[in-house]
């Protein structure tokens, strides 16, 4: 049994008025035997009740006389008693106020602890929502990365597509050997290329009966500058070689392509010289 319970159920008053159940009485007595506070309250309340009873009995025993003036008159004794009772009432009131203020303080403390609890719960909720927010941001970042990756893949794919897309009307230069004649005179090999980049193919048929390990091809411009050199070239089964070039490699002008055979010992021998002229469209 504690004071909260005792206050809440007015055990002191009910005890004194004999309105407690036997079990409650026993428990309360067990408590107040060791509790000065409760003993004090019991005494105060008891005095109050007895005082009230006394006043009541006095009033019954000595009924006041009613004078024509309409005033009540009390005996000296009953006035003294009344004063005593009033002071008891004041004391009891003070006790009541103290109790009430204590109760209010307890309630305030409870409210405070409840609000602290709510605050704690709110803080926990805020933190967990912050964590959720962080996770959300993380997954959003991952998604962004994935999208970026997909986009890159898509772009690469479209690049590959453009790499594999067909070029229509690819210029093809079929070279015939000009060996033994001046490249500049009587050059019949000519190709017209678009100025914008594109591809064109040079194809030629190897001459000579001897087969070599592989072939070496060199293209010189009109100033004898090597603009392209291809090693390890192997002809197809019709003894012809086709090489694709990017048009940007060539400018308008004359070129000389030399084909050499590479023997097993690494020695080379010129097999053919092919001159050609490139015209770039404006
Ligand atoms: Zn007590």
Image (cartoon, helix red, strand yellow):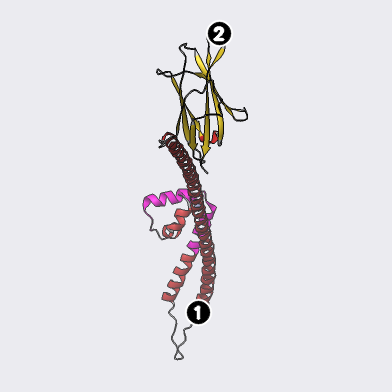
- What residue lies at 40% left-to-right and 51% top-to-bottom? 24
Residue 166 sits in which quadrant?
top left
Name the residue rendered at 47%, 65% in the picture: 50
Q: Using the image as rendered, state which of residue 166 and residue 160 is in the foreground.
A: 166
Contact between labelled residues 2 and 1, with CB atoms less than 8 Å apart:
no
Q: Which mark is residue 141?
A: none
Residue 230, visible in the rendered structure = no
171 is higher (above) or lower (below) than 267: below
The earlier-in-sequence mark between 1 and 2 is: 1
Q: Is residue 34 magenta?
A: yes
Q: Which residue is mark 2?
A: 265
Q: Which residue is mark 1?
A: 75
State the image coordinates of residue 144 (x, y, percent, origin top left).
Answer: 47, 43
In this image, 177 relative to 238: left or right? right
Q: Which residues are magenta?
A: 19-47
Instruction: Tell me the SS state at disc 1.
Output: loop
Instruction: State the image coordinates of residue 60 (x, y, percent, origin top left).
Output: 41, 75
Q: Is mark 2 within 8 Å of ligand 1?
A: no
Q: Is residue 129 above or below residue 246?
A: below
- Neighbours of disc 1 within 10 Å: few (<14), some (14-19), many (20+): some
Tag 2, which secondary structure? loop
Which residue: 45% across, 50% down?
Answer: 29
Query: What whole-number distance in Å separates the C-alpha atoms at marks 1 and 2?
Result: 154 Å
Residue 276 appearing in the image: yes
Magenta stretch holds residue 268: no
- Which is more foreground, mark 1 or mark 2? 2
């Amino acid at each position: 049994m504690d004071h909260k319970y005792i206050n809440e159920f007015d055990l002191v008053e009910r005890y004194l008025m004999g309105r407690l159940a036997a079990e409650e009485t026993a428990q309360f007595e067990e408590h107040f035997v060791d509790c000065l506070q409760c003993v004090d309250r019991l005494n105060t309340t008891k005095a109050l009740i007895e005082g009230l009873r006394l006043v009541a009995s006095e009033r019954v025993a000595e009924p006041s006389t009613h004078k024509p003036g309409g005033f009540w008159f009390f005996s000296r004794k009953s006035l003294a008693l009344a004063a005593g009772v009033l002071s008891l009432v004041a004391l009891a009131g003070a006790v009541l106020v103290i109790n009430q203020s204590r109760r209010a303080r307890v309630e305030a403390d409870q409210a405070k602890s409840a609000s602290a609890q709510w605050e704690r719960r709110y803080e926990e909720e805020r933190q967990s929502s912050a964590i959720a927010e962080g996770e959300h941001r993380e997954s959003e970042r991952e998604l962004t990365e994935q999208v970026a990756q997909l986009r890159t893949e898509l772009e690469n794919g479209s690049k590959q597509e453009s790499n594999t897309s067909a070029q229509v009307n690819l210029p093809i230069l079929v070279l015939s050997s000009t060996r033994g004649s001046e490249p500049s005179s009587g050059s019949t090999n000519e190709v017209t290329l678009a100025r914008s980049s594109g591809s064109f193919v040079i194809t030629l048929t190897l001459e000579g009966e001897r087969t070599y390990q592989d072939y070496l091809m060199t293209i010189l411009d009109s100033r004898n500058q090597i603009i392209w050199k291809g090693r390890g070239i192997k002809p197809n089964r019709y003894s012809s070689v086709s090489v694709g070039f990017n048009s940007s490699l060539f400018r308008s002008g004359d070129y000389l392509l030399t084909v050499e055979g590479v023997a097993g010992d690494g020695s080379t021998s010129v097999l053919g010289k092919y001159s050609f002229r490139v015209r770039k469209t404006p």
